[in-house]
Image: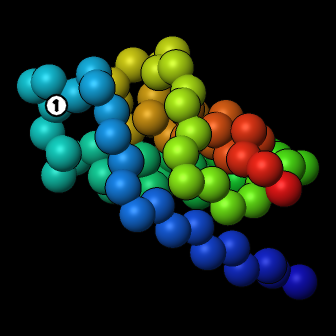
Amino acid sequence: MTRRIDLHIAELVVDALAGVDPARVGPELSSELTRLISEQGLPSRVGPADRVDVPLRGGATGAGIAEAVYEGLGRCPS
């Protein structure tokens, strides 16, 4: 059985995006976040959040931002 997960990010603010093409980052972020959730599942504490601050360890790339977003999902109040 396949579960459907809808994740809505209304606004994503990344301070380290100077010189990065946003048209490229969006699809990379989506692809990597899909991969992370598919392989690792959702963190146990996922819930709605107005704001989650997470350090950008993986660099200002779609994959790096996806890793930070995934980490932030685990910090959301349940």
Query: Which residue sits at x=67%, y=34%?
Result: 71
Q: Is residue 15 placed above or below 42 in the rendered structure? A: above
Query: Which residue sits at x=74%, y=39%?
Result: 75
- Decide if residue 39 is on the left or right side of residue 9: right
Q: Is residue 44 placed above or below 18 in the rendered structure? A: below
Residue sitting at the far bottom: 1
Q: Which image quadrant: the C terminus? A: bottom right
- The 10 Å Cα crowd at callout 1, few under 14, some 14 to 19, many 20 or more, is few
Q: Is residue 43 placed above or below 78 in the rendered structure? A: above
Residue sitting at the far left: 19
Residue sitting at the far front: 50
* Residue 63 visible in the current orientation: yes
The residue at which mark 1 appears reads as 20
The tally of labels here is 1
Q: Horizontal and vertical percent for residue 59?
A: 39, 19
Q: Horizontal and vertical percent for residue 21?
A: 14, 39
Circle 1 SS class: loop
- Decide if residue 33 is on the left or right side of residue 62: right
Q: Horizontal and vertical percent for residue 8?
A: 51, 68
Q: How is the image coloured?
A: rainbow
- Decide if residue 58 is on the left or right side of residue 38: left
The part of the image, by quadrant, that contains residue 52 is: top right
* Residue 38 visible in the current orientation: no
Query: Which residue sits at x=58%, y=67%?
Result: 7
The part of the image, by quadrant, that contains residue 30 is: bottom left
Q: Which image quadrant: the N terminus? A: bottom right
- Decide if residue 34 is on the left or right side of residue 43: left
Mark 1: amino acid: Val
Q: Horizontal and vertical percent for residue 47?
A: 75, 59
